[in-house]
Image (spheres, helix red, strand yellow):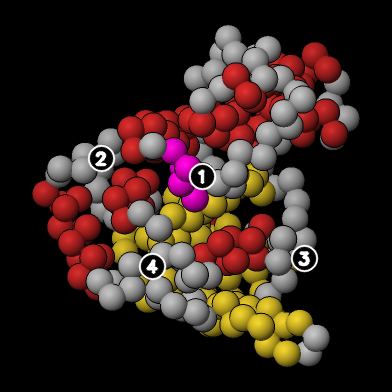
Amino acid sequence: MTEKDQQNRIKISCQNIRKIFIQKGKIQVHVLEDISLNVDANEFVVILGPGQSGKTTLLRIIAGLETPTEGRVLLDGKEVKGPGPDRGLVFQSYMLFPWRTVMGNVEMGPKLRGVPKEERRKIASHYLNLVGLAGYEKYYPHQLSGGMKQRVGIARAYANDPEMMLLDEPFGQLDAQTRYYMEKETVRIWEAEKRTVIFVTNNIDEAIYLGDRIIALEGKLPGRMKAVYPVHLPRPREHTDVSFLKLRQEIIESSQLLL
């Protein structure tokens, strides 16, 4: 592969990211230090770290919701200056409009962009079907389980037709069984409609199950990149597979004091 081909493949480039929160001229929290990484188009990258390791702040910088103190983020070679429709966001909290139906929530993005009603309904229906919620269009958020609410959030993000998806511990509030189901659904959806994905988690098993590559952050502030783990495992993956368990043990031993 030529250097030009490699550059064309890179979707996101984080270059020497440093983040310090300052208030009244004084350093409050030094969150990130010297984060540099590239994410290829259609790659599924997992940022792994415990609480207070800066992983959510890094994702928010990529999303354009935070500005780095030093360094920059490039999206398709252009510096990120703020949020945009090219990045779909899914957070741990469901952030659905409680007064709107499932359909109303999912079609909100296209509606705000001025997409005609018939077309945006078609778009929303497509993604509700993709996430397995066909038939729930007229339900309200309070009528849904946690897993179903998160699927609405994923469908809503996809309905904006983003070039990449940014997911911040989206399954952290779910019980273990629902979480595993949603992990399988996430892989299925990603394989059905390939997009670049950056997924934040503090769960090693989840990281291995989902990722093409795992970026492990140190477990203390300021967050620094501790290790990068390519995941050369075929999909679908099994948690009991020998190669899965071997990688899991490698990550645990490398980060036993930190994760």
From the viewer's side, name the closer residue of 173 and 249: 173
Q: Is residue 177 left or right of residue 5?
A: left
The answer to whether mark 3 and mark 1 are in CB contact below 8 A is: no
Q: Which residue is mark 3?
A: 81
Look at the image and tell me whether residue 29 can be seen. yes
Q: Which residue is mark 1?
A: 170
Q: Which residue is mark 2?
A: 237
| Residue type beneath disc 2 | Arg
Q: For the C terminus, which image quadrant?
A: bottom left
- N-term-proximal mark, 2 vs 1: 1
- N-term-proximal mark, 4 vs 1: 1
- N-term-proximal mark, 2 vs 4: 4
Task: Report the span colored magenta.
Answer: 169-174
Pinpoint residue 210: horizontal percent, then vertical percent: 37, 46
Quadrant for residue 179, please give it.
top left
Mark 4 burial class by Cα count in 10 Å: few <14, some 14-19, many 20+: many
| Residue type beneath disc 3 | Lys
Q: Which residue is mark 4?
A: 216
Q: Secondary structure at mark 4?
A: strand
